Amino acid sequence: MHRAVAFQFITVIWSRSHDIVGHLLPLPVSGLSYFCYCSVNQRSVTEVEMKTPFKNHLHLLFLFSVLLLILTNHPSEAEAETEVAAILSRFQQYLQINTAQPTPQYQQSAEFLISQAKLIGLEFQSIEFVPNKLLILLKWPGSDPTLPSILLNSHTDVVPVEQDKWVHHPFGAHLDSHGNIFARGSQDMKCVGMQYLEAIRRLKSSGFVPLRSVYLSFVPDEEIGGHDGAEKFADSDIFNSMNVGIVLDEGLASPGENYRTFYAERCPWWLVIKATGAPGHGAKLYDNSAMENLLKSIESVRRFRASQFDMVKAGLKAEGEVISVNMVFLKAGTPSPTGFVMNLQPSEAEAGFDIRVPPTADPESLERRIAEEWAPVSRNMTFQFKQRGSIHDESGRPVFTKTDSSNPWWNLLEEAVRKANGKLGKPEIFPASTDARYFRQLGLPAIGFSPMANTPILLHDHNEFLNQDEYLKGIHIYESIIKAYASYTSNGSTKDEL
């Protein structure tokens, strides 16, 4: 019998208890206890003694109600296996949709997500801020729409794959004998999107009604910057009307037993420096050639990079707490039909760098270093930023979310994870970038959290996988978090206090 049906049946029984007790067969308490035991253990109840009358028939109704709840809240092993198989199948279906950049199958992904929303009973809408880049927004309405809502964000796109480097097809969602599910997106971050849905499916099935509205956003293009996805969404009238109070987004897997949480992230600065100089014969020695000037700059960048990396190696700082600089391209030389002209020194040379700046850094000091040491005008050098994010929000405050007792959302998350038998590690600064930055820029608290413990970090790597047990535990974790967030009420008057 389904849980909801059992509750309804019990309600009817008790509402008519005065009529019913007069027609009940006398049954001893010991006999009913034996009946309960036999029912739970699937044994015959024909031996139940029915000789001594009950002194209190209401006691019988109470015990009968308990029996129904026991039976309906403890599904058989076969039922449990069927439920797990269905949960894993839905995850695999989502993973099998090829949403790899640069040609993600957003339409197919949207159709799958909307079908799940219909089955669960969630409101849904499909939004296109840019043609063919579908954003799916789901809503579980709360009983008090005046309270700030909860946003569970995830991205639908994944990074490209080198299929020949995988042991299983990257979009096959193969489940091996160890319970590992191999697929691009299994860690980054289709797992989290489906965990949101499965957690809400369970909560709705249990009869839970949220106080606050819960939104789920499935956004495009995070893997290429999120400019046509989360950035436009955060800047839209639709988002403004949602009255969001807290955002949850992606985190990282943890090789240990503690889950990782992220309260901030490093801001991307994509820098291109260009050197110019007089061209010359390949055999000629002269000063201030374009290549010489660029090489001096590269050496200066290398020294700075080493100073930052040394702090990480020594354990003085975490990776997310230092400024990282990595050269991503070099461009110089005069092309020829067979390659490059080998006896001509070029008049121009360029290098590109991916710089990640934590919110604790001094951006003005870094820009002075770039202008004075890495690309000085005195060496005929210039620089430009292909992208330069801000480490401050709209109010001029550092872009990070508090992870102490002053932030009730953090307290709720900590307690919810603990209740679900999970463990949190020390909050971190995310070493790269996620869509959470667009919400933090608005001054909203945003926490990055992907419940994947005892899991190697394989996002963007070959043979990305997630074990089925960790995936299922993550659903339980998010069920606890969503319930805590959606039930939270506060006397605060501002979003920061909520």
Image (tube, helix red, strand yellow):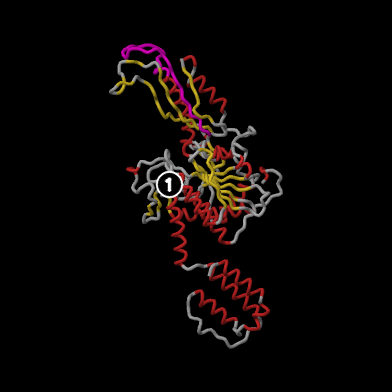
Residue 232 appears left or right of 305: right
Residue found at x 67% / y 49% = 147
Give the image location of residue 291, x and y in percent: 39, 18
Q: Is there any visible trace of residue 318 in the rendered image?
A: no
The count of marks equals: 1
Residues shaded magenta = 267-293
Above or below — where is 228 with respect to 344?
A: below
- Picture quarter containing residue 360? top right
Residue found at x 58% / y 43% = 446
Residue found at x 45% / y 47% = 108
Question: Residue 21 or 57: which is nearer the viewer?
Answer: 21
The 10 Å Cα crowd at callout 1, few under 14, some 14 to 19, many 20 or more, is some
- Picture quarter containing residue 427? top right
Give the image location of residue 271, x and y in percent: 48, 26
* Residue farthest to the bottom, as pictured: 51
- Picture quarter containing residue 262? top right
Above or below — where is 348 with respect to 317?
A: above
Q: Amino acid at mark 1?
A: Pro
* Residue farthest to the left, as pictured: 338
Residue found at x 60% / y 69% = 8
Give the image location of residue 163, x and y in percent: 34, 43
Q: Is there any visible trace of residue 25 in the rendered image?
A: yes
Secondary structure, mark 1, is loop
Query: Is 284 included in the stretch rendered in magenta?
Result: yes
Above or below — where is 97 with respect to 330?
A: below
Which residue position holds label 1?
Answer: 456
Question: Residue 259 or 103: which is nearer the viewer?
Answer: 103
Query: Is 245 included in the stretch rendered in magenta?
Result: no
* Residue farthest to the front, as pictured: 131
